Image (spheres, rainbow, N blue to C red):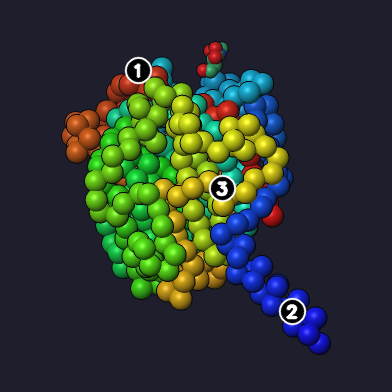
Amino acid sequence: MWQRSSLLLTLLFASVYHSDAWIYTISDTYVGQNFLETFQHIAIPDPTHGRTNYVDQLTAQYENLTFVDADSLILQTDFTNVVDPNSPGRNSVRIQSLKAYTTHAAIFDVRHIPEGCGTWPAIWETGPNWPSTGEVDIGHIKQSTLSSPSKSLVSMIFSHFSLIITTTTTYRLEGANNQSPSQSTLHTSPGCSMPPLGQADRTQSGRITQDTSSTDSFGREFNANGGGWYALERTPDDIRIWFWSRPDPSTPTAISSEAFTIDTSLWGTPIAHFPASISCDLNEHFGPNNIIIDIALCGDLASATFTDAGCGTDCATFVDQNPTAFIDAYFDIASIRVFEP
Ligand SMILES: *[C@@H]1O[C@H](CO)[C@@H](O)[C@H](O)[C@H]1NC(C)=O
């Protein structure tokens, strides 16, 4: 009897403790050629109402918008053609992993993210039934994130790149217009609100509605440094995001050495931390998610910030008429490694 309750107690402690120390082993390594078999191109009308024409895989490879070699995946927008304003927009790509994940950690080793006015690149995760009847709504929800706290959303903007969490199924890292706004913002809703920093074990280095000093996690500075690593951990208890610039000496060895086993408790303070709490049950709101990488043009976020970013007044005309402005609108992804418990 004593043994049994002690075991129970141990289990109880183990399950309480693991949210701070979770060991994972590698389950999928996405690199080079295998992206073509493990991700699908999603050729859908631009769900964010922009000037993006997402093409299928054949077209993307034929036009060299999707290119792989042994150790890189390049995804880029068309940068040679002037676009007819009556067409759906500039050719671009959106890819989605065939596999979906629940509890996992993912390391995105990224050498270059798309730069330039009108671009809205994103790396994100969302539910496997996408696109389904809810697809347009996801686009709408993303838009509403920025303006309407009454939607069931949590969004956090880290300067140029942002993490947006919907209380249904989505979170994403994204940025727009090569912009480096100096604010991080948190929008919460009654359905899923987050405790203030310092409470409920919520610690992160990104500030809320305060100036941030780090500019190396996005845009030109990110690329000039040779990129870096974004890492994401999702458990039933927390969603955390980390970032290390390529030359950052504090990059965990397991990340830079591509270890098969990782321990996220050794990764230090995340740039963002969304703990589950009585006001936001992550289990209830998050199902299995696929990884998505896309480059949107104009669209809700980029259009809304286009002028502030010093890009001009009309995002759509800019995108249609200036192909050479998109020469640097590409992702160069060294690898994505996904770990599960
Ligand atoms: C396709 O794109 C890659 C990556 O940018 C580049 O290295 C290669 O030369 C391009 N191929 C052609 C035929 O343009």
Q: In this view, does 16 lie above or below 173?
A: below
Q: Earlier in the sequence, mark 3 or mark 2?
A: 2
In this picture, is 160 found above or below 81? below
State the residue position of label 2: 6
**Disc 2 + disc 1, Cβ < 8 Å:** no
Residue 35, how many percent across, how many down?
Answer: 65, 33
* Residue pointed to by mark 1: 324
Q: Quadrant of residue 160?
A: top left
Query: What is the spatial separation of the Cα atoms under label 3 and label 2, in whole angstroms?
Result: 28 Å
Query: Which three-letter amino acid code belongs to the residue tagged 3?
Result: Leu
Q: Return the residue nearer the eye: 191 or 216.
A: 216
**Residue at screen point 44% across, 64% down:** 201
Q: Which of marks 1 and 3 is in front?
A: 3
Circle 2 Cα neighbour tier, 10 Å, few/some/many (<14 / 14–19 / ≥20): few
- Res. 336 visible in picture: no
Q: Could you tell me if the residues under marks 1 and 3 are in contact, i.e. CB atoms within 8 Å?
A: no
Disc with the residue nearer the chain's start (2 vs 1)? 2
Instruction: Say which residue appears at 62% left-offset and 62% top-offset.
Output: 18
Write down the residue under mark 3.
266
